[in-house]
Amino acid sequence: MIRHLLKLVWHRKRSTGLLMLEIAVSFLVVFAVALFALRCVANWRRPLGFQWQDVWVVNVDTNASTDDEGTAEDVARTRQLLAEARSLPPVVATAGALIAPYQIGGSYGVLNYQNRSARMSVIEATDDFASVARLHLVAGRFFGRADDGSNVPPVVINQRLARALFEGVDPLGKVIGHGQRPVRVVGVIDEFRQFGELLSGGNVLFERITLANADERPPRRLMLRMAPGTTAAYEPELVRRLAPVAPGWSLSVQPLAAMRHSQLRLQMAPLVVGGVVAGFLLLMVALGLLGVLWQNVTRRTRELGLRRAAGASRAAVHRQVMLELVLVTSLAVVPALLLVVQLPLLSLFEDLEPLLVVAAAATALVVVFALTVSCGLYPSRVATRLAPADALRWE
Amino acid sequence: MLHSYLKLAWKVLLRRKFFTFASLFGVAFTLLVLTVAAALLDDVFAPHPPETRMARTLGLYGMGMTGPESSRTSFAGWPFVKRYMRDLPGAEKVALLQLQHEVDSYPHGQKLTSYLKRTDGAFWQVLDFHFLEGQPFTEDDERQARRVAVINETTRSRFFSNGHAVGRTIEMDGQRFRVVGVVEDVPFLRVVPFADVWVPISTARSDSYKREYVGDFFALVLADPARMDELRREFAARVAAARPPDPHTFTRFYGGLESLFEFVSRLIFAPHFEEAHTGSLLGVLAGLALLFMLLPAINLVNLNLSRILERTGEIGVRKAFGASSWTLVGQFVVESLVLSLLGGALGVLLSGIVLWALNGSGLIPYAQLTLNPRVFLWGLAFSAAFGLLSGVYPAWRMSRLHPVEALRGRPQ
């Protein structure tokens, strides 16, 4: 049966060729959107590594053109700002960092341990960062006063970085090269996805800001954990209290929740636009397929009438038409599928999980088959509606 | 001849309503997406008020310093502009403006976030702002560091609920400014002029900008259009000859006068300032448009093929009476052009609605996306290209039918 149908399809290869091309391209479109969407969903379900609720961020702009150098005065003033903020009743804990979560930017570094090396995002933060952001320690501790005496600076890394560098070895206490100067791992946190729930996140390394040395970069963000229920009405009061501590600096307050909201909206935008466009493309393809299949079947009315006359039941003819369609769809999808399978092998995209590719391909398969089959149902009914005698005479 | 083709095309469209609907939907949707994209690009790069003199304006947007071990790429610095952009050939005015940044104010106890941009006095002469009340601040205001501000319409209504703003004060980033002028809102996508509030550079809270050769400024040069090349060459020579203040870290500058489109192309393709890359950005945009048109085009080819297959009898008759293949190709191409122009008109109409909704949604602050003639012409060009793309192949297929086979109504 299948071989016979294949022969039928082969005989009409010129007209089915284009139809197959259309189906294959539709498959690729659905696949791309599905992959992107599934990736977002998968990322959303993984732990974020910190708690954004009730955290406010004070952006500190010293109005100097470069952020690279600080003076002893800058460091002292930052310390005063943090102390002033901590003294306010709704503030539960304070920390300083060079960059807050949900902010674009930051600095990157490369780290070596024996013959392995990894690239990671470097976040400079004060000792209280762990309690403000509610980081999840898996091993060891966050840096703090205990590190004051040591001459090797302490760092905390996330599990992903620990796996990349130490595969199987306990990272605690290891001294690793970071730039020119070595650092010691004192703790491992489970995760810190600084760009939010939708992105997969990467290797992260926390470096300590002591706010004691004049030659360190003072933090540009103050992170304040507020008492639950503190409303935005407190923002002006906070600025009013902090501004006199640092005249000449520009301070602006933003709840982390608001930053998260706008960042998520920004990251969702391509998905929403792509989804809407793909949806309309599919609708267009559906209309086109319906027209083309209708036309194809109508042209074969006499052929199908002959089968009826030779004794095939209406259901059998119906089945033949649908099977042909499924066959054409399968033939179209196979090369597209082969193309798509290359994606994880090509490693064009970092950390593209093979499972996601499989899931997206499966989604695309289901959508494309559902599309073609539902577009074929009506035309094949039309083709078998005529009585065999009429069909044979049909012009 | 064309007249009867058009009449025939119209009749064919009316005969198979479902096919017509499916084709029109595809064309209209494709054109809708392309036109909206074109309108967005037009809003970023084409001359719109206040940037009406774009053909006469060049900018120093990105620049940097490089040395044996490190390099720094950023924007133009104040001392660099002051020192090396004086007396350029053909230049009439040089304006300086800082990148805008967000500042918070608490006028009625609740937070208002505005974009603040610091500029010099020449900025108001190089650009063509429309003042609703008052006037711009002057070069003298800038020299004297007077705390004066020009605000946009939206800021006026947010801060001063009733009427006039000129003469009143506004607090921004902890500084108080006297409002001297109110201008119409500038769309967010106009990166050069965009802001809510414009104040003199010299009112900055720190004067460290005066020491940064690579900083966060844009410089605009309003020049004689006939001497643009000379101007670019002269500036390039000055950049090549200039030496950074700290010769141990950085040995030379890079950067040049260019249009915004050239700047953006270079940001994308050659962030390290090798040369202009305008061609490749245009190429990439065209490639994306073609890629997007691929599926709709295949879809339309399929529909057109089916539609023409129905008419094999007619083709047979015309061939038997001596119509050449070329005549038939011409006829079918005209038919598909009619179809795609109709669909295109529909698509452009729909995109007008989408743009209007986008402007109203506030997704892009102060968006004024419009279907201006330029965008409309793009839409027309897209639909014609689309019609040809999807019409030529089916026409060619049908024109090759053998008349005898065609008369029997049995195409291969």
Image: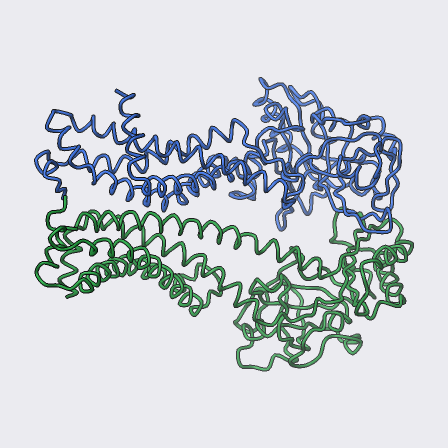
x then y, percent, for residue B150: 80, 33
Q: Which residue does the image show at 41% across and 59% down from the upper left?
A: A31
Q: Which colour scheme is used?
A: by chain
**Residue A64 seen in the current view:** no
Image position of A147 with respect to B257: above or below: below
Q: Colour of chain A?
A: green
Relative to residue B9, is residue A267 drawn left or right?
Answer: right
Relative to residue A369, is residue B282 drawn left or right?
Answer: right
x then y, percent, for residue A326: 26, 61
Q: In the depicted view, which residue is nearer to us: A10 or A390?
A: A390
Q: Quadrant of residue A318?
A: bottom left
Q: Quadrant of residue A126?
A: bottom right
Relative to residue A366, is residue A334 drawn left or right?
Answer: left
Q: In which quarter of the image is residue B123?
A: top right
**Residue B269 seen in the current view:** yes
Which quarter of the image is occupied by the C terminus of chain A? top left
Image position of B106 with respect to B160: above or below: below
Q: Which chain is blue?
A: B
x then y, percent, for residue A104: 65, 55
x then y, percent, for residue A53: 72, 67
Q: Which residue does the image show at 59% across and 24% down from the upper left?
A: B55
Q: In the depicted view, which residue is nearer to us: A354 or B320?
A: B320
Q: Which residue does the image show at 73% across and 60% down from the upper left?
A: A98
Which quarter of the image is occupied by the N terminus of chain A? bottom left
- Total labels: the figure holds 0
